[in-house]
Image: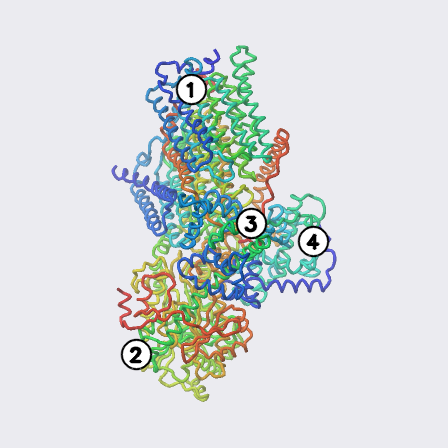
């Protein structure tokens, strides 16, 4: 079993490499000597290549090994009384396949970004965040317990939000980043909730305890109701990261970041994290058909939404974002109807193809010209059959709704954010009034903010 | 026998192995006090900060020596009889046990960082002396064995922040009055509660319990008795406000005076209120337009989680609460101090627009983010460990508690990122000079950040220690196991 | 709800006035059309009637953009010697004239005071930062670090005299500085308050933002951008917007209207729709605008400025509507009826709805929208505080050695004068002077170099009878290629002419889908030319076209399919994994991937090996875009004649004349076209060169020319070709037609060109950080080839960056001079052009083009975000028409940062090899040129054709250039001069003494 030992060591090494890179960069920045691009560039390329290599070779070694060999226990992290928290990874086939995909794509994107972000003031920031992201997504892929998933989940969320807001001088990326983070944090409640419930039911969040050991046909010890509840919470968690209905609005907005991070996050990895999680939790879905049906339903609704909205997008990145989302929805349908290997294959294929397409997005004009040359004239018009099938009024309504992206964000804001704001503003007023009652009137020392933006400034 | 019933320490301190032969604790408490006096007399000098830091280094050494001594002896507590011997016979006035031994260095670190980063702008002269004075009072509270003395110190510790608020002039008048009313009430309630509790009458004992609980809730800023806090953070000098709140004296009083022998129902009530505070504060923080006010709400939200653990449903959640005490104290103090130094560079900070300036203070932005995510329990920081334990231990009993903690943490995260984006991103209206961190500021923040990261990645020693404390307190409370059993 | 606003029928003259104001304001919009054909032009074209300096200030104010580089940048240049103290003194003296000696408040001269501000950084922090700096930095404890040693010593001596010798230097410094700061503060308190004028924004959005911090554009822009994007889209969306033939406003109202779902969520908008539709029916978009103006409460007097501000709020999109309205033929695929009035009407409609919503929510329900807006408070203007003003004085006083006591002794009038002078010399003024100094330094260097080189040229002289002649575009990127060619083949002669070589045509290559115009943008070509296969190749060409079409259809199907629902599922799930191969190849090994792709294409379908241009006039075929197919022989003769005259080689043709157009091919580059030939209107000039050669070789054309007295020797052969400025490939066309006798010469020239392009690649690589400086030329060539193929490469080439000068004249005047790819080189022979007719036509064509390029680079560099397109990294192609930042923003016009980052923004310095009088006469006769020169948009100088004297035309007078240096650097070869250096290089004479330039480079 030496090969299995080596495989495990490689897998663990692959997870720690990007984290190490981040630590080195953070330390260097803290002592006032941030790595210059000249140094960082080879270091980062090496680390990401090594990560990809280690993981792929580790996967090659571990895939044939038996289930026992695929569990990696890194020991107790901390303990209080009889509550011990173990760092546990699970390197079974789906984990290894997804993790290899993650590592390879991160490696490719790191190589791409190394040239793409050359001389960019945020070069450091980008690689620090990419390292954080890589750590997080590998933790999600290889997690052996729901707590480890959560840790990875949060890292991915934070890195995503900060990368969306990468071009922080303009308000639009920052607002988009904040919106994505808000959606993430709220749907993360699903994951934490699932963790809480699993602990409540089983006293442990380890996968082998509540999912069984042999994916994809594991047996969960939970009752149907319990499994359904946990699965629904996981689905809720997947809604945010996967941009599923009704949380799809952040996805096109996330295209504010630099192209390589858009490719890896919203074309490839981050957007599939939710689907992967549900795939992982397949035994729960098997035990709870209702929850499985809901997964399929959400997937279907998302795919329909995304394909309609995607069809009217006139900029290439939004069009690709919705194209991604369409496939994610379909993958969810596949998971919901009980397929396991097909969605895994679909994830891998889709992630690869789509990230290549996003990386190529700036070449669109070039490609378009090439295609026109090949076809020998203007490209054939698309969308005709939609127009043949639908009566004019419906068509127009559908077009308008799609152009407005079904007003999903507006709906979320009206339904949740605005009431929270109103409530909080009301409570704040009440508190201030109460203080005024106790301590007399407050001095108004908050003048109206001065206008800092010039005309048109925020359109940039 | 009020002292005996109130204090498990008193009995423990009389054990032969728990007495100190030298006035270690007295020195630890007195060093900042004497230093403060000396600095106040000397006036503002160029060496003031250096001298204060040297003194604090010494003090930290003393506190750590006391901690080491406690562990070396394997004793439950250590009493310093020197001060008591000087005043009232042999009674130990100062003593530490496993709970408080770690709190002394904790408070000293916060104060030391505050002294390191304290800006020169916008503060009245004598700031450092005042910070030291506040620290001394906090240390005295953490090392006090006698509830009557605790009540006295409780009242005394209100004076520095009150004076600070008054010094702020008319703009802080309202905040200062509100603070005086709330804090006066809490000091009074605590004193009366302590006094009544020995009376023996059941009715009076109930009243005493009520008063003590109210006092603790006010001091800790627990809803609905928290209203002083946002106004306080909004108007008080930030450094003093942080030193007053971050060590969380209220939690100490709760652990010391209320926890040992009040019925579970009372604790449960406090914990429920704290849980509500956590969610309420975080929700309020997400929409505030003023950075300080948002910080104030975030503070009461995340520090309330400490008290949630005191519900004592399980060893794990109690340990979680105790370690959150340390982590939220450090992280929130650090976060507040980043606001402090940023305010010195930018003036009043608002969150309803983007200020820009990431490139002028890149490191400060990164540290703000780091300390911020540590405050809201992000994985990889100590806060995550604490919350994980808190939830893990409690969910067997109350899944809802887990959801509420998660919600508070989620909302806190949103509030934090909103603040980060508003304060550091956007385009600055015009080019200005770089306002990079000074080396002493970098050092102070880096120290805190590194502490939180290292403890977050390698939390075993601290968690083990806190679990030990939790076990001790539960045992002292008597029949914790039964408590647990009956609920199970 | 103000539906009534639409009720009244607007009067005709009202509509006419709106149309007029709109037209007027529209001139300010960016003139950039669809991005696939990028035309360089002066960003501030609309301001050309003013002088450059007035224009940048006025436009800066209007657009919120920077007029010059930042003060900090100039100061860095000062520190590293790019600007010298002499330059500052000179521009100051020139600027102030006699007023420079006037004493300010009896303390120091005016010039002295200004110079102190220019030479030393004066920081102007905002109030909070100032407090922090005073408290935390050593501003109040030490003298400035950048004081000259003498000044510092004077201060300390004075301090010792006051505070006693026994105190430490540090203590004295502290006391001095504090005392001085206190005195400045006292002075600032005594000074009269500065007058602050609050500007009242016209747009209600700006007023609401200033008063309440609420931005109504946040509600308007998302909808507007989506509608505008959908309307103009040229084929990205799978499902096009319905009803586009009816115009933007109508199509949008139909979508937003009762049938559309979008409006349901915004009752304010829904309430306005019936009125808007009614207005549209009655008076079109202008009536709708009139109604909006009424509802927003815009007075007639404010109408024009209001429309201007409204247009500028989203100026990229507005500009595109305007461009497509004026030149619908430039739309790449569909030309829908786009009008600016539609866009503005829609915008105002959305704006009204948003403002109504916001004012209702935040300002109360009472009154009409107009009344609510009128009640908005004005934002007060803020005057700088005394501390702030004192700090400004404090910094200068240290530099000038003004003592505290001297400040305290000033009477009120003097204090007022002092502060007025300090505050009058504001940041824009300082930057203007710094910029003048920055330009002066470069101008002097160049003029010195040209003069010295003219006086004493080194290296091989220009051959009297060249072995071959090579004609290039005037593009400054060809300067290095020409120089290397001359170094390698000293017997050759190189020439420069605008890269369409006089052949203005629509051209359709054998593989092209459509004809494209290949000529300067100001010309609309009449002629259309096709490339056709020759003889039996025709069948092969058709076969290839068929198979390419099949593959193209498949590929299109795949691309669209992966984005759809069902097909996407199949394609991604089943074939997606295979994408890992192209992905890894293209990202990690771009050059290899490019080669594989080309090779596989060649193996699959070999195209016709022989094609020709169908140049001759055909009346049987119908042109797609032009008026006629092909040229008559007379037209051809005229074209050839003109070019040869312009070049000045009509009478002395070599046996071989190579004509090279140029273009640039790169991936991942929406701005690809901006790297192509400007003289070909953002196209690639290969076909023009090829056409010219074919014309000049045509016996019939030669006959006609001979009749007119222009004899082309029978031994002379013309060969056309193209130079790819991105990967430095050079391709020659129609080589199979070359006569036997010329063949060896062509071989020789081809070898020389091959070596020259390799060295050119090597020289270019010195500017790329990613290319190590040790690369030998062959690897450098591989490096630039890799760049062109690299998906991740945002700087495939640097384009026109670093352009700074334009030399119009004989190559002999600059041959052997290393000009660092910074000079447009236009051939002109002053002999035999005594009337200046040739000069007039050369300058009239070349100068506006070169100035346009130069000024576009200038503005994109000084404000990369405001005038330029910002960084490329978040760019997102929309509608095949332009790029946005992220998912919805204004269209980004101008050049992206990655194209201009190494550019030195200086105005073009034109040096004309002609007598001063002739140049003056030409300029006077051409109003466009006169405006450019008199407005100082370019700098122009005459180089005496017979000697080294240079006269600079400045402010109407001629200024003889007095050389500032006596010697010019010298290097044996270009590579010896640039090796290992990445920055801009000064001029040098390339002696050519080392015949082994190549070995030098390889070493």
- Location of mark 2 (residue): C744
- Tell me how far mark 3 sits from mark 1, CA to CA: 58 Å
Q: Quadrant of residue B23?
A: top left
- Tell me how far mark 4 sits from mark 2, CA to CA: 79 Å
Residue B346, position in %: x, y?
Answer: 51, 44
Classify mark 4: helix, strand or loop. helix
Classify mark 2: helix, strand or loop. helix
- Location of mark 4 (residue): C295
The answer to whether residue A7 is left or right of residue A292 is: left
Numbered mark located on residue C187 in the image? 3
- Tell me how far mark 3 sits from mark 4, CA to CA: 50 Å
Chain under callout 4:
C
Chain under callout 2:
C
Residue A94, position in %: x, y?
Answer: 37, 41
Chain under callout 3:
C
Instruction: Tell me whether circle 1 and circle 4 mark residues in contact (CB < 8 Å).
Output: no
Disc nearest the viewer among 1 and 4? 1
- Tell me how far mark 2 sits from mark 3, CA to CA: 83 Å
Q: Are marks 2 and 1 on the same chain?
A: no
């Amino acid at each position: 079993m030496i090969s299995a030992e080596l495989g495990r060591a490689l897998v663990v090494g692959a997870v720690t490499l990007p984290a190490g890179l981040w630590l080195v960069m953070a330390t260097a920045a803290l002592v006032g000597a941030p790595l210059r691009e000249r140094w960082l560039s080879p270091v980062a390329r090496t680390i990401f290549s090594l990560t990809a290599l280690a993981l792929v070779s580790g996967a090659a070694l571990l895939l044939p090994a038996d289930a026992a060999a695929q569990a990696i226990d890194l020991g107790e992290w901390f303990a209080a009384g009889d509550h011990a928290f173990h760092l546990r990874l699970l390197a079974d086939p789906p984990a290894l396949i997804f993790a290899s995909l993650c590592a390879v794509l991160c490696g490719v994107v790191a190589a791409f970004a190394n040239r793409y972000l050359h001389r960019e003031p945020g070069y450091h920031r980008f690689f620090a965040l990419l390292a954080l992201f890589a750590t997080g997504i590998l933790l999600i892929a290889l997690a052996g317990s729901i707590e480890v998933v959560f840790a990875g989940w949060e890292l991915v969320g934070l890195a995503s939000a900060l990368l969306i807001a990468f071009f922080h001088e303009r308000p639009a990326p920052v607002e988009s980043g904040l919106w994505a983070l808000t959606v993430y944090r709220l749907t993360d409640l699903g994951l934490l909730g699932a963790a809480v419930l699993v602990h409540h039911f089983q006293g442990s969040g380890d996968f082998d305890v509540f999912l069984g050991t042999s994916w994809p046909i594991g047996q969960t010890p939970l009752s149907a109701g319990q499994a359904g509840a946990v699965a629904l919470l996981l689905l809720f968690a997947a809604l945010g990261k996967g941009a599923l209905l009704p949380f799809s609005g952040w996805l096109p907005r996330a295209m504010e970041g630099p192209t390589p991070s858009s490719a890896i996050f919203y074309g490839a990895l981050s957007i599939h994290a939710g689907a992967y999680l549900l795939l992982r939790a397949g035994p729960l879905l098997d035990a709870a058909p209702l929850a499985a049906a809901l997964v399929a339903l959400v997937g279907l609704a998302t795919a329909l939404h995304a394909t309609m909205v995607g069809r009217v997008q006139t900029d290439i990145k939004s069009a690709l974002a919705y194209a991604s989302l369409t496939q994610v929805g379909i993958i969810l349908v596949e998971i919901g109807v009980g397929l396991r290997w097909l969605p895994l294959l679909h994830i891998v294929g889709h992630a690869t193809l789509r990230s290549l397409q996003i990386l190529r997005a700036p070449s669109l004009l070039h490609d378009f010209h090439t295609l026109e040359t090949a076809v020998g004239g203007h490209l054939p018009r698309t969308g005709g059959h939609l127009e043949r099938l639908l009566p004019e009024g419906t068509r127009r309504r559908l077009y308008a709704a799609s152009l407005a992206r079904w007003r999903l964000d507006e709906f979320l804001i009206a339904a949740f954010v605005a009431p929270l704001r109103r409530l909080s503003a009301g409570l704040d007023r009440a508190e201030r009034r109460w203080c005024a009652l106790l301590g007399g009137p407050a001095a108004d020392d908050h003048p109206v903010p001065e206008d800092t933006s010039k005309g048109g400034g925020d359109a940039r | 026998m009020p002292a005996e019933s109130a204090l498990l320490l008193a009995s423990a301190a009389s054990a032969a192995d728990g007495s100190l032969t030298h006035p270690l604790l007295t020195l630890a408490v007195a060093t900042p006090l004497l230093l403060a006096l000396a600095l106040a007399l000397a006036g503002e000098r160029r060496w003031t900060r250096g001298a204060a830091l040297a003194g604090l280094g010494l003090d930290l050494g003393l506190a750590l020596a006391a901690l080491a001594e406690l562990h070396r002896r394997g004793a439950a507590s250590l009493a310093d009889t020197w001060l008591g011997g000087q005043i009232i016979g042999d009674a130990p006035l100062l003593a530490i046990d496993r709970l408080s031994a770690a709190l002394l260095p904790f408070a000293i670190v916060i104060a030391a960082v505050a002294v390191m980063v304290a800006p020169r702008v916008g503060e009245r002269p004598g700031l450092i002396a005042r910070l030291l004075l506040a620290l001394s009072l906090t240390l005295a509270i953490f090392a006090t064995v006698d509830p009557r003395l605790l009540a006295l110190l409780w009242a005394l510790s209100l004076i520095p922040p009150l004076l600070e608020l008054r010094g702020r002039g008319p703009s802080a008048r309202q905040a200062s009055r509100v603070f005086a009313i709330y804090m006066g009430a809490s000091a009074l309630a605590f004193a009366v509660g302590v006094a009544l509790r020995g009376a023996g009458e059941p009715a009076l004992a109930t009243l005493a319990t009520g008063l003590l609980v109210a006092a603790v809730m006010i001091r800790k800023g627990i809803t609905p008795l928290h209203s002083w806090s946002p106004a306080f953070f909004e108007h008080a000098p930030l450094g003093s406000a942080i030193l007053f709140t971050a060590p969380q004296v209220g939690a100490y009083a709760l652990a010391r005076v209320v926890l040992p022998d009040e019925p579970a129902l009372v604790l449960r009530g406090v914990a429920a209120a704290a849980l509500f505070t956590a969610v309420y504060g975080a929700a309020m923080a997400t929409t505030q337009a003023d950075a300080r006010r948002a910080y104030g709400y975030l503070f009461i939200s995340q520090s309330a989680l400490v008290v949630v653990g005191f519900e004592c449903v399980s060893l794990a959640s109690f340990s979680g609460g105790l370690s959150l005490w340390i982590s939220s104290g450090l992280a929130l103090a650090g976060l507040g101090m980043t606001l402090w130094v940023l305010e010195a560079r930018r003036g009043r900070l608002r969150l309803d627009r983007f200020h820009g300036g990431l490139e002028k203070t890149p490191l400060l932005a990164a540290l703000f983010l780091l300390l911020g995510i540590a405050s809201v329990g992000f994985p990889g920081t100590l806060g995550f460990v604490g919350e994980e334990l808190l939830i893990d231990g409690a969910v067997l009993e109350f899944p809802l508690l887990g959801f509420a903690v998660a919600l508070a943490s989620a909302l806190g995260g949103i509030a934090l990122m909103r603040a980060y984006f508003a304060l550091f991103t956007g385009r600055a209206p015009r080019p200005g000079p770089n306002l990079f961190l000074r080396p002493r500021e970098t050092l102070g923040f880096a120290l805190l950040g590194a502490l939180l990261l290292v403890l977050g990645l390698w939390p075993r020693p601290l968690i083990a220690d806190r679990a030990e404390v939790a076990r001790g307190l539960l045992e002292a409370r008597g029949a914790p196991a039964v408590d647990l059993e009956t609920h199970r | 709800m103000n539906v009534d606003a639409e009720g009244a029928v607007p009067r005709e003259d009202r509509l006419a006035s709106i149309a007029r104001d709109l037209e007027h304001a529209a001139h300010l919009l960016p003139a950039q059309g669809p991005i696939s054909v990028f035309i360089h032009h002066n960003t501030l074209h609309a301001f050309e009637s003013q002088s450059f300096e007035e224009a940048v200030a006025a436009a800066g104010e209007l657009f919120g953009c920077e007029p010059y580089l930042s003060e900090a940048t100039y100061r860095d240049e000062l520190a590293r010697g790019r600007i010298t103290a002499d330059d500052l003194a000179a521009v100051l003296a020139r600027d102030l004239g006699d007023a420079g000696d006037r004493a300010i408040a009896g303390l120091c001269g005016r010039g002295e005071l200004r110079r102190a501000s220019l030479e030393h950084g004066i920081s102007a922090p905002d109030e909070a930062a100032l407090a922090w700096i005073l408290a935390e930095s050593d501003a109040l404890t030490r003298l400035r670090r950048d004081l000259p040693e003498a000044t510092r010593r004077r201060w300390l001596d004075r301090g010792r005299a006051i505070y006693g010798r026994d105190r430490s230097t540090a203590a004295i410094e502290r006391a001095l500085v504090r005392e001085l700061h206190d005195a400045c503060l006292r002075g600032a308190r005594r000074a009269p308050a500065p007058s602050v004028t609050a500007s009242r924004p016209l747009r209600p959005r700006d007023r609401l933002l200033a008063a309440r911090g609420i931005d109504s554009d946040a509600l308007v822009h998302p909808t507007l951008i989506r509608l505008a994007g959908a309307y103009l889209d040229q084929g990205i969306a799978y499902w096009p917007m319905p009803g586009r033939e009816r115009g933007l406003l109508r199509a949008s109202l139909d979508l937003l209207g009762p049938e559309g779902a979008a409006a349901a969520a915004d009752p304010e908008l829904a309430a306005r729709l019936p009125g808007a539709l009614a207005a549209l029916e009655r008076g079109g978009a202008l009536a709708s605008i009139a109604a909006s103006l009424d509802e927003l409460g815009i007075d007639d007097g404010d109408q024009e400025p209001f429309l201007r501000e409204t247009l500028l709020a989203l100026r990229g999109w507005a500009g595109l509507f305007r461009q497509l309205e004026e030149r619908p033929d430039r739309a790449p695929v569909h030309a829908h009826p786009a009008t600016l009035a539609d866009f503005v009407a829609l915008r105002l409609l959305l704006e009204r709805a948003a403002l109504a919503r916001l004012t209702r929510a935040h300002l109360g329900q009472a009154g009409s929208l107009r009344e609510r807006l009128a009640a908005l408070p004005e934002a007060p203007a803020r005057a700088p505080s005394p501390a702030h003003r004192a700090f400004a004085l404090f910094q200068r006083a240290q530099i000038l050695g003004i003592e505290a006591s001297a400040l305290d002794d000033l009477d009120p009038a003097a204090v007022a004068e002092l502060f007025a002078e300090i505050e009058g010399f504001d940041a824009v003024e300082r930057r203007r002077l710094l910029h003048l100094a920055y330009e002066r330094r470069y101008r002097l260097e160049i003029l010195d170099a040209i003069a010295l080189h003219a006086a004493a040229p080194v290296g091989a002289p220009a051959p009297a009878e060249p072995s071959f002649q090579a004609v290039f575009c005037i593009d400054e990127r060809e300067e290095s290629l020409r120089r290397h060619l001359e170094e390698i083949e000293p017997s050759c002669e190189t020439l420069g002419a605008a890269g369409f070589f006089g052949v203005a045509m629509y051209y359709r290559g054998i593989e092209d889908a459509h004809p494209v115009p290949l000529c300067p943008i100001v010309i609309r070509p009449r002629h259309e030319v096709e490339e056709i296969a020759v003889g039996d190749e025709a069948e092969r060409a058709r076969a290839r076209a068929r198979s390419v079409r099949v593959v193209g259809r498949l590929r299109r199907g795949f691309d669209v399919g992966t984005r759809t629902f069902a097909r996407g599922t199949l394609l991604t799930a089943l074939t997606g994994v295979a994408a890992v191969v192209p992905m890894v190849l293209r990202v990690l090994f771009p050059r290899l991937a490019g080669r594989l792709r080309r090779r596989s294409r060649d193996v699959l379908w070999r195209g016709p090996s022989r094609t020709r241009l169908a140049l001759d006039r055909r009346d049987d075929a119908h042109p797609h875009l032009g008026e006629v197919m092909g040229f008559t022989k007379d037209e051809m003769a005229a074209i050839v004649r003109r070019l040869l005259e312009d070049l000045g080689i009509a009478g002395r043709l070599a046996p071989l004349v190579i004509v090279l157009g140029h273009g640039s091919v790169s991936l991942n580059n929406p701005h690809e076209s901006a790297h192509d030939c400007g003289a070909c209107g953002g196209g690639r000039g290969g076909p023009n060169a090829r056409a010219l050669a074919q014309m000049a070789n045509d016996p019939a054309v030669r006959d006609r020319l001979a009749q007119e007295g222009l004899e082309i020797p029978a031994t002379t052969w013309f060969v056309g070709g193209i130079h790819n400025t991105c990967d430095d490939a050079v391709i020659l066309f129609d080589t199979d037609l070359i006569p036997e006798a010329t063949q060896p010469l062509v071989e020789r020239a081809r070898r020389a060109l091959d070596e020259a392009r390799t060295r050119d690649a090597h020289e270019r690589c010195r500017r790329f950080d990613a290319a190590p400086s040790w690369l030998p030329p062959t690897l450098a060539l591989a490096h630039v080839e890799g760049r062109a193929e690299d998906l991740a490469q945002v700087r495939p080439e640097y384009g026109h960056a670093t352009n700074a000068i334009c030399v119009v004249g004989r190559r002999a005047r600059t041959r052997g001079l290393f000009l660092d790819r910074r000079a447009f080189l236009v051939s002109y022979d002053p002999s035999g052009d005594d009337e200046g007719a040739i000069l007039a036509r050369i300058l009239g064509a070349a100068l506006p083009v070169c100035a346009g390029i130069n000024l576009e680079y200038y503005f994109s560099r000084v404000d990369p975000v405001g005038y330029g397109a910002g960084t490329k990294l978040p760019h997102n192609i929309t509608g095949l028409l332009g790029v946005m930042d992220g998912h919805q923003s204004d269209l980004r016009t101008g050049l992206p940062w990655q194209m201009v980052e190494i550019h030195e923004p200086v105005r073009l310095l034109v040096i004309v090899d002609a007598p001063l009088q002739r140049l003056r006469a030409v300029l006077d006769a051409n109003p466009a040129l006169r405006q450019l020169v008199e407005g100082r948009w370019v700098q122009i100088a005459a180089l005496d054709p017979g000697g080294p004297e240079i006269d600079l035309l400045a402010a109407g007078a001629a200024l003889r250039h007095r050389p500032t240096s006596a010697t010019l650097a010298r290097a044996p070869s270009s590579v010896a001069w640039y090796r290992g250096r990445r920055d801009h290089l000064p001029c040098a004479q390339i002696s050519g003494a080392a015949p082994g330039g190549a070995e030098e480079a390889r070493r």
